[in-house]
Image (cartoon, grey):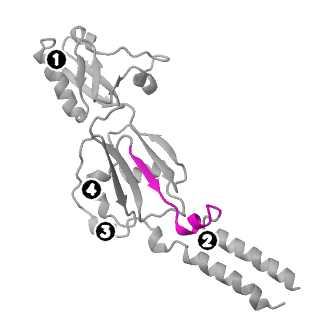
């Protein structure tokens, strides 16, 4: 048997696989981070969107007069759970409205929580219900979806107004070895429009852009590298490539004997 004819296809297969492997430069995060040290951070408030669930607390020096403007929330073992607050919270309609006791319809869609607080406060005072009220608005159902090449994909809740992209990846247990780090897709819906951002994690240039903080209902998509995509997901990293090659060589040697 001509060994060259047998080994040549194996060599070509091995060469093709390694051409698709991820290099060190494509793997490392934030490779130019030092260039962006001491840069100014910019934060922007998120806007209330349809299907948000809001918790609204109205207070006054006299709690009795403010009580009718607050929703009663049940408790479990003396404690109020987030899930129970969601069930009794204010659901924002597709038109951006909520229905509050006494005030009835209030349009909050497109406003930041701070602006919504001010609007409700002005109505309470302007319509003669309260003299010096306090209003606190908070979104209860903050969550993002992360799909693709992460170790724990899914829908992940968070309690902050927004979190960093690196926080989101950390909550998903980091990217897999096969992830394309140079083109992370961030999908966001704002004011009835769908926006798509492309982020390169190998550089730190995106970190100062406030658009790249993860907000309510964001979707993050992480694509697989060529090796995994071309193999239909059967081959995930170079270790598997070496294993397959070693097995093929073992078969060839057995046949040659």
Q: Which residue is mark 4?
A: 209
- Tell me which residue sits at (51%, 44%) in the image: 154
Q: Nearer the viewer, residue 151 or 110?
A: 110
Query: In this figure, what is the number of numbered marks?
Result: 4
| Upstream in sequence: badge 4 or badge 2 | 4
- Residue 83 percent across, percent down from the top left: 45, 26
Q: Is residue 230 magenta?
A: yes
What whole-number distance in Å separates the C-alpha atoms at marks 4 and 1? 37 Å
Q: Which mark is residue 46?
A: none
First in sequence: mark 4 vs mark 3: 3
Q: Picture quarter containing residue 47?
A: top left
Q: Secondary structure at mark 2?
A: helix
* Residue situated in front as seen by the camera: 109 or 112: 109
Q: Which residue is mark 3?
A: 34
Q: Quadrant of the N terminus?
A: bottom right
231 vs 105, left or right, is right
Q: Which residue is mark 2?
A: 238
x, y percentage for residue 14? 65, 79
For label 4, the crowd category at 10 Å Cα-Cα, with few meaning under 14, some 14 to 19 and many 20 or more, is few
Q: Earlier in the sequence, mark 4 or mark 1?
A: 1
> Answer yes or no: do the residues labelled 2 and 3 have beta carbons within 8 Å?
no
Question: Which residue is farthest top?
Answer: 64
Pick whichever of labels 2 and 1 is earlier in the sequence. 1
């Amino acid at each position: 048997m001509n060994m060259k004819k047998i080994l040549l296809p194996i060599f070509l297969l091995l060469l093709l696989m390694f051409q698709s492997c991820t290099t060190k430069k494509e793997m490392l995060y934030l490779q130019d981070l030092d260039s962006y040290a001491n840069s100014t951070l910019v934060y922007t408030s998120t806007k209330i969107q349809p299907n948000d669930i809001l918790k609204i607390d109205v207070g006054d020096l006299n709690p009795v007069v403010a009580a009718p403007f607050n929703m009663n929330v049940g408790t479990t073992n003396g404690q109020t759970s987030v899930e129970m607050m969601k069930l009794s919270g204010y659901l924002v309609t597709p038109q951006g409205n909520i229905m509050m006791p006494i005030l009835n319809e209030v349009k909050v869609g497109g406003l930041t929580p701070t602006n919504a607080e001010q609007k409700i406060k002005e109505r309470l005072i302007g319509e003669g219900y309260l003299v010096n009220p306090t209003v606190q608005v908070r979104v209860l159902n903050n969550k993002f979806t992360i799909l693709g090449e992460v170790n724990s994909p899914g829908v992940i809740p968070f309690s902050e107004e927004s979190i960093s992209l690196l926080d989101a990846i950390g909550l998903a247990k980091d990217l897999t070895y096969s992830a394309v780090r140079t083109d992370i897709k961030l999908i966001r819906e704002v004011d009835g429009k769908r926006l798509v951002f492309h982020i390169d994690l190998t550089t730190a240039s995106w970190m100062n852009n406030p658009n790249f903080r993860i907000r309510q209902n964001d979707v993050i998509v992480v694509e697989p590298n060529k090796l995994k995509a071309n193999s239909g997901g059967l081959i995930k990293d170079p270790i598997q490539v070496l294993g397959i090659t070693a097995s093929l060589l073992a078969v060839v040697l057995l046949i040659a004997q």
